[in-house]
Amino acid sequence: MNLYFSDEEIQNSPSRKDGISFEIEDNLRRYGTEVIQEAGILLELPQATTVTGQVIFQRFYCRKSLKEYDVKTLAMGSLFVSTKFTEPQRKIRDILNVFTLIWQKKEGLPIDYIDTTKQAYWDLKGDVIAAEFDILKEFGFLMYVDLPHKYILNYMKLLERSKELAQKSWNYLNDSMRTTITIQYKPESIAASSIFLASRILGTQLPEEPYPWWELFDTTKEEIELISFEINNLYSKPSAYYIDVFNPTNSEAASPITNTTSTTTTTTTTTAT
Amino acid sequence: MNTHNQSSNQNGGGSGGGGGGGGSSTFSPIVLTSTYRLDVQEKYTFSYEIGSGTYGMVYKADDKKRPNNKVAVKKFRSTKEGEGLSLTAYREIGLLKELSNENIVKLLDVCLNPKDKLLYLIFDYAEFDLFGIIKYHRENGSHFSDATIKSLIWQVLNGIHYLHSNWVIHRDLKPSNILVMGEGKECGTVKIGDFGLARIFQSPLKPLNENGVVVTIWYRSPELLLGSKHYTRAVDIWAIGCIFAELITTKPLFPGKEKDPKIPSLFQDDQVEKIIRVLGKPTLDMWPDIKHLPEWKRLSSMEAFPNSLAKCVGIDENSQAYDLLSKMILYDPSKRITASEALDHPYFKELPLPLPNAFSKPIPYPPRLPINKKKREFDD
């Protein structure tokens, strides 16, 4: 069993009750999943661990408000929990160092390693362990994540398609983790949509006779188009950035999201294995 | 928790590898809602400590809402290094929440205490374990009845077959992990427990409690002893075979002495010698792959002995019990009988037949006693 949420549940997430708009939540979801991806690369984690962390993060904010749980803490906690469930062990100090480095780079602060003798380090460590508790408590240890990546690999072997198509699909799949699609649709459908997008951008024809290729994924063309639209829409959104809605004092000062279009539409590249 | 109307047919995950064989079955996880959960102290009345291990402590307790229900509360210590909850806890909970079988211990509740930030697992309370009841017979010079032995082993195999069919390898089967229910509707039912302790390459664990029970290598299979890093479900079958023999004789079958972990070589020569004294030395004919194992040369230079299993266990070489036992402790893991095949063995079809209640009336075994010592300090 996987955990899925409806459009309505996401539109009316717990953050809405705290006056946080859908746009701000969407921005923070993208921000949190982006930093998890970057941390996963720096920590040399297998993609499965990183994606599991992103899914845990997305699920959590369908149950809890952004005002109640800070995005930065939850991003660290989600990846921390994921490393334990998928078992490439990483020390909590390494996780703290990597995420701190990412915050510093993103916010233009001087790069500085955490001093483990300072109280700030222990406070941060306590925050992550508390986040671990909150995540596990919320889902009752029901953390199983069925990843869509394996369906791409299986399909490519079946059809003997090019490595280029596989890599492109893989990249779209990684990007899809920054949307709530990952907690709304079953992994086979998301995999199929990534293949669809990749085939379009590469001009590769996928078979529709004697039966449409998407039937292998137990999905429909309509569902593929719906998911593909959402993934594509990602590249029209402005770059995600941190807003401290967790701190009540600063939340009123948060500026509204502008509608400026991002000038680049790079996809997140990790090598498909 | 709500789910989208499109449901996945994916099976839940289990740990451990496994070769081909039994197909996986679809099962639903037991979803425990943790929101607004009370402190463990508010739900359960603790009686006394009944066990301990590297994970923490186990207590007998009463469910306040159902006064007649005894439970076992397993309290996990925080890790020494301050790395949050232990991997042992993750592994055990992750598995037990997915598993449901009459011969697997049932996880009733998970409490993450807000106050002390500790993790508590709540299980059905089992009054007995095989270690305790074997010890009773050994000290009294008595033996289990044939019906009890057969019922216990059948139920252990039934639980393990369920695990193996779901791609789970227990990896730590020994008498103290085989629980048996006391008085009640499940009286005499086996419950396989302790899913979080299985470790192959970790340094030896500390003593379980003051009674002298230690995690031993007595139940470790020869492929592991000879350094194989690839293990299969056959390691569980070997352990059950050792337990089977121990139920018959009330003495461990291969009681080797574990080496001091500080000694550089990890080859457990005493344990291996205990095995070859009973089963004879393995040959390339009976175990072709043995020559690929890291410690093969050490074994090949050891003294040879004839097979004396029938004499050691005191059963007829022509009996079905001997046939089943010998197939469970074959050297070659690929030839060892599987749980599925074992359940279908003629031994279980001849009288006396295995029963859901393994005990005869009245139950002669004493109940668990509280551990007589002060509480240990934990790194909280």
Image (tube, coloured by chain):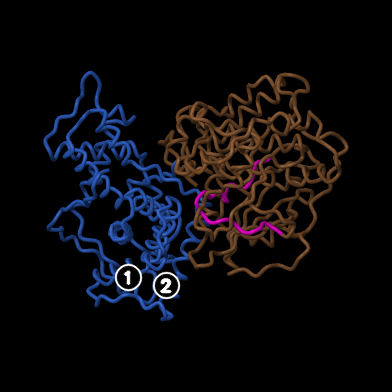
Chain colours: A blue, B brown
Which mark, by number, is residue B35?
none
Q: Is residue A19 above or below residue B99?
A: below
Position in image of residue B306 (x %, y %)? 64, 31
- Check residue A143 for magenta coloring: no
Q: Are marks 1 and 2 in contact (CB under 8 Å)?
A: yes
Q: What stretch is highlighted in magenta?
A: B191-209
Residue at label 2? A124
* Magenta stretch, main secondary structure class: loop
Q: Is residue A261 above or below residue A4?
A: below
Which of these two is toward me, B158 or B75? Answer: B158
Which of these two is toward me, B24 or A72? Answer: B24
Which of these two is toward me, A246 or B189? Answer: B189
- Which quarter of the picture shows residue A77? bottom left
Instruction: Report the amino acid beneath label 1.
Output: Thr
- Check residue B205 for magenta coloring: yes
Helix or strand or loop: what does disc 1 sit on?
helix
For disc 2, the neighbor class at 10 Å (few under 14, some 14 to 19, many from 20) is: some
Q: Looking at the image, can residue A13 be seen? A: no
Instruction: Report the amino acid beneath label 2.
Output: Leu
